[in-house]
Image (cartoon, rainbow, N blue to C red):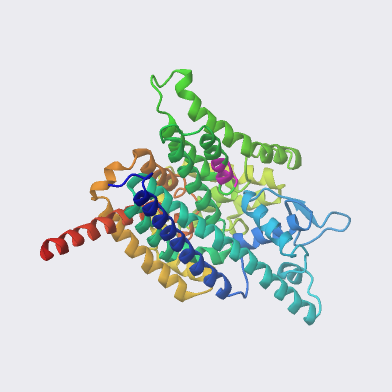
Amino acid sequence: MASSSSPAGRRRISDLALLLVAVVLLALSVRVVLALDAPSARIGGDPAVYDEIGVSIAGGEGWSKPLRHPVPGRADDRPTALHPPAWPALLGATYALTDHEDHLDEASVLRSPPDLGAAHAALATADSRWTAARLVNALLGAAGVALIALIALELWGPKVGLVAGVVAAVYPSLAVLGVTLLSEPLFVALELGAIYAVLRRRRPGGSWRWLVLAGVLCGLAVLTRANGAVLLAPLCLAVWTGRPRLRPRALLAPAAIIAAAVLTVLPWTLRNASVLHAPVPVATDLGQTLAGTYNPASAAKRFRWRNTRHLPSVDAAALGHPEAQRSSALTRDGLRYLAAHPVAVFEASAWNTLRLIDVDPVARVDLAGELRSRALARVSFVGFGVLALLAFAGLFARRLRAGPWWLWLTPVLLWLGTVPFAVNFDRFRAPIDPFLILLAALAVTAVGERVGQAAAGRSS
């Protein structure tokens, strides 16, 4: 085999780089087409909140949410930490760069309907703004594909790396999420970036800068989705290789990752303490998540999360508190229900797992509603089914043993950090899908090699 320093080796590396670039461009093309062709009538739910805060940030008003019913003599908006800040911040930067920092948007039209001409202008502005956000998601999705290919390349070599990149590029579920203005494409890119940084650190002579980068990316993942904190465990285990393990020198690498992650999150935590006058590490959404999942009405619907506006009357009283206090009150309501019904967490986890894997028909309807397209939802559902079968076959691939155990711990922890809470459709499976893609790539590569060997045997 030619070494990487020989002309033949350099040529092979150059050819591999060109193929990887082609795969990433394919992924980007698919996502850009979806972004430009996405239904644009309206967005709702979490994306509408992200969009609203993004406009506020772009307009210089910071992380604040406009009041639906302004009170005379008070500000028309209020500081918020209902959602983690990273994705709204990226939206705010996008809107500022694309000149979408004004407030003539759909939300303002609904609050104070102007004349018909102004309404059409507002919707056109929102349309343009959402397209810009979808294009950012397209770039993040392509970055995720590149990182999946690089991780597979690092662990199993060029063949698996290329196959993983191609599978990720055309896998529908990750591609279609970009049109929804959800935060998952950003989270996936940060998650994979942190894993790749750790793999680079594990190379002989790997720089400590990779540890810092892994920690910063993990911190940014936490600021995108709070359950990103579970990534710290596998990342730290990956670099905790010194012996004896409890010696200070052996603990330096995992400590560096933790310190970088904490320092990345800390400014936002301090902002929350100052503005919300309460200890809020990342977001105030825990209360509405717990109380919205664990209550009698949700239990009657297989623990499907309910909006806090539709909670039973015993919980509704909490809605009158300021944001941080409301979250604390709702958290207590959810925990009280769990104390009285301890088996509920297992029931909710089972039903939410079925929603994650698209078995629940209501979850598929929710996905179609989020995408504004039944066709895209069907393609996403079928694509996941194919990927799941290939991933199952990948569990028996010989190369699987070459992958580090901590890598496979990551999707398990992400699943455990998701299913006890609010899951209405498969969006929360997105951070787990890259690991299914890696397994599928192992299976496809193994089959391809066997077919090639059989063909070579026949020809000889």
Is the residue 280 above or below the residue 432 in the image?
Answer: above
- Direction from residue 339 to residue 276 in the image, left or right: right
Q: Provide residue 99's location: percent of width, then percent of height.
A: 75, 65
- Direction from residue 306 to residue 274 in the image, left or right: right
- Which residues are drawn in magenta? 217-223
Q: Closer to the camera, 404 or 317?
A: 404
- Direction from residue 229 to residue 16 in the image, left or right: left
Q: Quadrant of residue 268?
A: top right
Q: Residue at x 49, y 56 (%)?
A: 298
Q: Is residue 220 magenta?
A: yes
Q: Residue at x 49, y 30 (%)?
A: 254
- From the image, give the main secondary structure of the stretch colored magenta: helix
Is the residue 243 above or below the residue 148 in the image?
Answer: above
Q: Closer to the camera, 395 or 209?
A: 209
Q: Provide residue 290's location: percent of width, then percent of height.
A: 54, 48
Q: Provide residue 319's location: percent of width, then percent of height.
A: 67, 51
Q: Provide residue 245's location: percent of width, then percent of height.
A: 40, 22
Q: Closer to the camera, 358 or 25?
A: 25
Can I make out residue 404 in this image? yes
Q: Quadrant of residue 92?
A: bottom right
- Direction from residue 152 to residue 229 in the image, left or right: right
Q: Quadrant of residue 167?
A: bottom left
Image quarter where the C terminus lies is bottom left
